[in-house]
Amino acid sequence: MSTTVRQYQYTKDKSSLLARMKKIEGQAKGIQKMIEDERYCIDIVQQLAALSAAVDELSLLILQGHIEGCVTDAIRQQHGEEHIKELMETLRKAMKR
């Protein structure tokens, strides 16, 4: 029995995505330190907004890869309906935040 490893579209930018994740991790640790140091409320909220924006951008990049890879391939193979439905459910969840 052979095992096929799926190559996802986003993996072509893996190093860039991981660098973004490390930046997000650093932002989160910075916010934690701000809370520990009892920094001004508005400064913390501003950093949380920046963190949220960074996470949103990363999500969009991965979704773009999903659309360009998985969804496009499924449409070409005439199996797009399932992938489009999954994509729409994901977008609905993301927009409800």
Image (cartoon, helix red, strand yellow):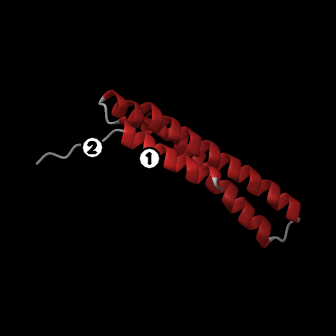
Q: Nearer the viewer, mark 1 or mark 2?
A: 1
| Furthest residue toward left | 1
Q: Identify the amino acid type marked 1.
A: Glu
Q: Is residue 33 above or below residue 23?
A: below
- Residue under pointer 2: 5
Q: Position of residue 10 (x, y in %)?
A: 46, 38
Q: Is residue 89 above or below residue 10?
A: below
Which quadrant does the C terminus fall into? bottom right
Question: Which of 53/12 is in front?
Answer: 53
CA gap between label 1 and label 2 equals 21 Å
Mark sitting earlier along the chain (1/2):
2
Q: Give the residue displayed 40% in from the left and 30% down from the top.
A: 72
Question: Which of 94/54 is in front?
Answer: 94
Q: Is residue 81 left or right of residue 46?
A: left
Q: Is residue 91 left or right of residue 81?
A: right
Element type where label 1 sits in the image: helix
Badge 1: how crowded within 10 Å, few (<14), some, or many (20+)? few
Question: Which of 70/45 is in front?
Answer: 70
Quarter residue 40 falls in: bottom right
Q: Position of residue 91 (x, y in %)?
A: 55, 46
Q: Give the residue displayed 59% in from the left and 51% down from the top.
A: 94
Q: Position of residue 4 (x, y in %)?
A: 22, 43
| Furthest residue toward top | 76
